[in-house]
Image: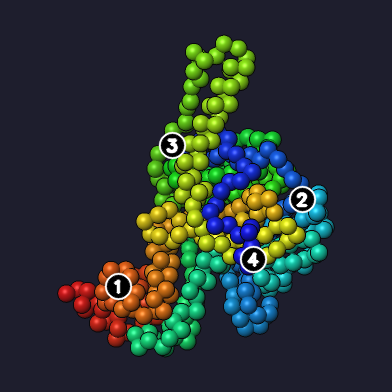
């Protein structure tokens, strides 16, 4: 039976958007929550290692599927039936994996993306949970030994599979925006735009938690658009005016201000339309009381804007946590190619028909996408010769 809390269409239920704040090419849209339940809290756990090796399958030091990345921090989630409290200080520093020294540096070995630490406490690695799910799509490779595939492709699939990203501190403008702008009393999140392109959304359940986590946005990773659009000019501040002809009292003025704020929210929601309102494919990760932690991705259609992310939804459908990453066009194309192959049972001719191309052109596209190792050298060479002709 499908869990009703699994997201099929991403909606900002229980949230509203405030007028944006602009710093150069950055546009930050505060996300507010009018009703705070108080039974889900999150706090920060920092790491100072050069990299983390997370055991996705298998033991900490045993052979198995591993995820390797720079992980600057994790989130510790606590929940309760009525009111939960964020945990701080010594409570926040239990043994989280093991550290291996490598000269002056250290590498952290960690159990799973989501690790239960107490009866009502969970440690998770934000964004890395979503990225690990993205990397694992079609990871096993061909299940049928088609003659076109290499021995490596048949035996190991997509192992290893990697994607690149950009840390937030690579763009000083983001740091300046986060330091400069005010945080609203009811603010629980932020929509981050660069050159008016939505790069990321971050939402938590409680305003106090957001204040403590606000600066972590500069440590998160983003797609190449963060730097690519960094060379563009400033974005315009959005200005709205009051209709003076409709104001004859303080009540009228209050109504006009509310209308103006709603117009702002509607426009910012329109700007984020590639995420909010999008159909998504979700997978449940962990049930925590009445909450469901899940990760998702949008359609992966190369003609559309695409995001991956993770979310927590309450029993009433309220979006209590959200963290997203915008896929680049190249990342979307790679995922789309793999999905078409998987839906065709990895048969090149069938997949080529679905893509309205030839098997030879599909083989060249796979090589250009970085998946040439899946095919035999002879198949690639023949495809390249025909492609050149």
Residue count near mark 3 (Cα–Cα under 10 Å), binned few <14, some 14–19, many ≥20: some
Q: Earlier in the sequence, mark 3 or mark 1?
A: 3
Q: How is the image coloured?
A: rainbow
**Residue that protrudes farthest toward the top in the picture:** 248
Q: CA distance from mark 2 to mark 3?
A: 38 Å
Q: Quadrant of the N terminus?
A: bottom right
Residue 182: x, y in percent? 63, 34
Q: Earlier in the sequence, mark 1 or mark 2?
A: 2
Q: Secondary structure at mark 3?
A: loop
Q: Earlier in the sequence, mark 4 or mark 2?
A: 2
Q: Secondary structure at mark 2?
A: loop
Residue 46: x, y in percent? 69, 58
**Residue that protrudes farthest toward the front in the picture:** 1
- What label sits on residue 235 in the rendered view? 3
Q: Is residue 3 above or below residue 207?
A: below
- What label sits on residue 285 in the rendered view? 4
**Residue beneath disc 1:** 353
- What label sits on residue 39 in the rendered view? 2
Q: CA distance from mark 1 to mark 4?
A: 35 Å
Q: Is residue 276 visible?
A: yes
Q: CA distance from mark 1 to mark 2?
A: 51 Å
- Residue at the (68%, 77%) spot, across then down: 60
Residue 91: x, y in percent? 82, 58
- Residue at the (47%, 87%) spot, across then down: 155
Residue count near mark 1 (Cα–Cα under 10 Å), binned few <14, some 14–19, many ≥20: few
Q: Earlier in the sequence, mark 2 or mark 3?
A: 2
Residue count near mark 4 (Cα–Cα under 10 Å), binned few <14, some 14–19, many ≥20: some
Q: Secondary structure at mark 1?
A: helix
């Amino acid at each position: 039976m499908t869990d009703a809390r699994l997201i099929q269409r991403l909606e900002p239920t229980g949230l509203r958007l405030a007028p944006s704040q602009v710093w150069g090419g950055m546009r930050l849209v505060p996300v507010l929550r009018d009703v705070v339940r108080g039974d889900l809290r999150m706090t920060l756990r920092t790491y100072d290692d050069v990299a983390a090796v997370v055991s996705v399958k298998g033991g900490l030091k045993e052979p198995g599927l591993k995820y390797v990345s720079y992980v600057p921090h994790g989130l510790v989630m606590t929940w309760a039936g009525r009111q939960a409290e964020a945990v701080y200080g010594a409570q926040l520093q239990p043994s989280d994996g093991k550290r291996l020294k490598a000269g002056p540096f250290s590498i952290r070995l960690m159990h799973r993306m989501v690790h239960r630490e107490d009866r009502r406490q969970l440690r998770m690695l934000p964004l890395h949970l979503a990225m690990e799910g993205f990397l694992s799509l079609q990871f096993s490779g061909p299940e049928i030994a088609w003659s076109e595939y290499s021995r490596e492709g048949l035996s190991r699939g997509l192992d290893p599979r990697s994607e690149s990203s950009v840390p937030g501190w690579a763009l000083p403008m983001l740091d300046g925006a986060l330091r400069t702008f005010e945080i609203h009393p009811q603010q629980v999140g932020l929509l981050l735009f660069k050159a008016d392109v939505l790069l990321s959304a971050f939402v938590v359940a409680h305003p106090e938690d957001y204040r403590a986590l606000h600066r972590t946005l500069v440590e998160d990773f983003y797609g190449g658009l963060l730097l690519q659009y960094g060379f563009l000019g400033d974005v315009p501040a959005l200005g709205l005016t009051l209709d003076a002809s409709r104001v004859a009292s303080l009540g009228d003025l209050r109504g006009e201000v509310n209308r103006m704020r709603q117009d702002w929210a509607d426009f910012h929601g329109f700007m984020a339309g590639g995420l909010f309102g999008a159909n998504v494919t979700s997978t449940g990760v962990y049930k925590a009381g009445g909450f469901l932690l899940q990760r998702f991705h949008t359609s992966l259609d190369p003609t559309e804007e695409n995001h991956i992310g993770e979310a927590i939804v309450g029993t009433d459908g309220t979006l209590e946590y959200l963290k997203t990453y915008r896929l680049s066009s190249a990342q979307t194309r790679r995922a789309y190619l793999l999905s078409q192959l998987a839906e065709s049972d990895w048969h090149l001719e069938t997949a080529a028909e679905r893509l309205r191309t030839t098997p030879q052109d599909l083989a060249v596209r796979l090589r250009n996408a970085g998946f040439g190792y899946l095919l035999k050298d002879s198949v690639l060479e023949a495809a390249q010769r025909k492609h050149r002709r």
